[in-house]
Structure formats: structure tokens, C-alpha cells
Amino acid sequence: MTTLLCRIELNKQEGVLITVDNEADSIVHTIVLNDKSITTTSKGSSQTSTMIQTPDSISLSCKDFKLEADNISCHANQKTSHTSGGDFAISSDANFDASAVNDASLGANNVNVSGTTLIKAEGGMIKLQ
């Protein structure tokens, strides 16, 4: 088993610093607790992930983010935004529903809609151009 260098520093001005250093694998984990935030960092030889928590926000920065649970529920009182610098996929092994109280739009250079059994469109007025 790898020997770890573990350190806890207490400082009245800087806060608390907890460090676990795995020199054999070039990995350093740190937790910094101060008067403004909690910062957790995991630094390897080529990648670093960071989580910063303040009283009003949580920020994550990493190469690969995975979330797994039986149920996931997200709620925003204002706005939700999902953006991808590459491909973006949404899929379900069961039903898929999307709805809006007001308008809904879908736009792209090309739009393909397919259904193996039925495609159904309903509305007070349907406009095809």
C-alpha cells in the first residue's frame, strides 16, 4: 500500500487546510475551509478537478462528470440552461415527454422526425412550408 503524506493546518486568518499527498501516484487532494468558501481539489499529474462551495453557489470543474441515482429531480426557480461544445443527446429507455406552458421551438440546419409506428401532430392550426 502507498504511504500517504497527510497534513491538517489550522490558521486563524487562512482557515483550515487538509492535504492528502500520494507522491507515488502524483495525486494531491486538498480541502480548504475559510471564511468565504469550501474548496475541494483533486490534482493528478495531468488533470485537476475542483469544487467550490459558497453560501449561494456550488461550482464544479472537471474533465468527466458522472451522476448516477435511481431518481434525479432538478428544479430551478428561474432559468435552466444546458449547453454543449460538441454533440448533445437526450434519451430514455421508456417514454420521453417535453412540454412548455407557452411556446416551444426546435431549430437546426436539418430536422428529422421519425416514428416506427405513428407520427401525430395536433393543433388549432398546423402550418407546413
Image (cartoon, rainbow, N blue to C red):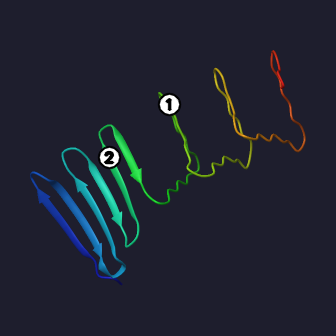
Residue 8 placement, left or right of 117 = left
Residue 33 placement, left or right of 75 = left
Q: Position of residue 68 (x, y in %)?
A: 55, 54
Rendered residue at 33%/49% (across/down): 52
Disc marking residue 18: none
Q: Residues within 10 Å of mark 1 (few under 14, many from 20)?
A: few
Q: Residues within 10 Å of mark 2 (few under 14, many from 20)?
A: some
Q: Secondary structure at mark 1?
A: loop
Rendered residue at 50%/30% (across/down): 79
* Label 1 sits on residue: 79
Q: Is residue 23 above or below residue 121?
A: below
Q: Position of residue 9 (x, y in %)?
A: 15, 63
- The answer to the question of whether label 1 and label 2 lie on touching residues, with beta carbons closer than 8 A, is no
**Of the residues tagged 1 and 2, which is closer to the observer?**
1
Q: Nearer the viewer, residue 3 or 87?
A: 87
| Quadrant assignment for the C terminus | top right
| Quadrant assignment for the N terminus | bottom left
> As drawn, which residue projects farthest toward the left?
12
How far, Cα to Cα, is label 1 from label 2? 20 Å
Q: Secondary structure at mark 2?
A: strand
Rendered residue at 29%/53% (across/down): 39
Rendered residue at 52%/56% (across/down): 66
Q: Position of residue 122 (x, y in %)?
A: 83, 23
Quadrant of residue 55 within the rendered picture: top left
Q: Is residue 85 above or below residue 7?
A: above
| Label 1 vs 2, first from the N-terminus | 2
* Label 2 sits on residue: 53
> As drawn, which residue projects farthest toward the top?
124
**Which kind of residue does numbered mark 2 sit on?**
Gln
**Which kind of residue does numbered mark 1 sit on?**
Lys
